[in-house]
Image: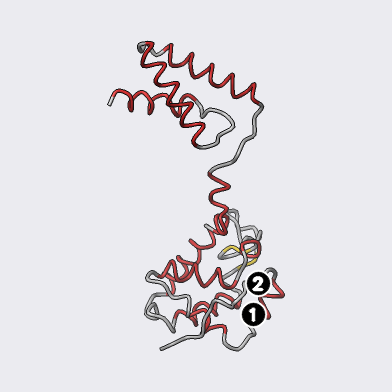
Amino acid sequence: MQFPSCLNLRPAKNLEELEKLINSGDLVERLAGAEKPSLQSTVRGMMKLLLTRELALRFSFTGMDSRRQTTKESFKSHAAYEMIIAALKLTKHFLVKRADVNRAVMNALKNVPDWEGFRDHRIRKPTATPKSSAASTSIDIKNDVEASGYSDDLIAETLKTIRTFTQERNMSQSPPASDVIGDAIRALNA
């Protein structure tokens, strides 16, 4: 069975746009076009077709937090959830249990903060530091290496490795000594 392309489906930026999208005639078929090998990736793809990251952040599965306080919109009671259920019936995942779908939706909602490349922003927070701070970090690294009791040649090679690592990655400062010293020394001893 061939479904219309889902590529021209624009995710809703707000609840009003989501309602219009839900009321469009061929939404279920277009969502089914997002079928992937796993249920989790299919549900995530369908949700990304329906919602922008900003709108998805306004939802949780139940709408409640751990203290059972209403803090967000409930996705399971929204018509968008029923659209995903209907679309799944048109895919190879048509036999999955509702509990499995719920788990996939909850997992997708849990990971919404990472959508649209925001995982990289969360993991690698760029820090701009003055050059004097970078220089003091290098001095701290040198002092840590010297305190380790290794030979001067090994210390010089370790510091050279750290500087190369920093320059190759265009980092404004050397990484913390605790993160690098052990790896550098093990690499030099290998």
* Mark linked to residue 21: 1
Residue type at mark 1 is Leu
Which image quadrant: the C terminus?
top left
The picture quadrant where one finds residue 71 is bottom right
Residue 98 x %, y %: 44, 74
Location of residue 138 in the rendering, given as x and y in whole percent from the top left corner: 53, 20
Q: Which mark is residue 12?
A: 2
- Number of callouts: 2
Q: Nearer the viewer, residue 164 or 186?
A: 164
Q: Is residue 23 above or below residue 173?
A: below
- Picture disc at residue 129: none
Q: Secondary structure at mark 1?
A: helix
Q: Quadrant of residue 157?
A: top left
Q: Are marks 2 and 1 in contact (CB under 8 Å)?
A: yes
Q: Amino acid at mark 2?
A: Ala
| Name of the residue lying farthest toward the left | 190
Label 2 neighbour load within 10 Å: few <14, some 14-19, many 20+? many
Find the residue positioned furthest to the right: 16
Q: Secondary structure at mark 2?
A: loop
Residue ID at (44%, 84%): 90
Q: Quadrant of residue 73?
A: bottom right
Q: What residue is drawn where x is 64% and y is 34%?
A: 128
Q: Nearer the viewer, residue 106 or 45?
A: 45
* Residue 92: x %, y % from top left: 37, 79
Query: Mark 2 or 1 closer to N-term?
Result: 2
Q: Label 2 vs label 1: CA separation?
A: 7 Å
Type of colouring: secondary structure
Image location of residue 151, percent across then percent down: 35, 11
State the residue at coordinates (56%, 72%): 49
10 Å crowding of disc 1: few (<14), some (14-19), many (20+)? some
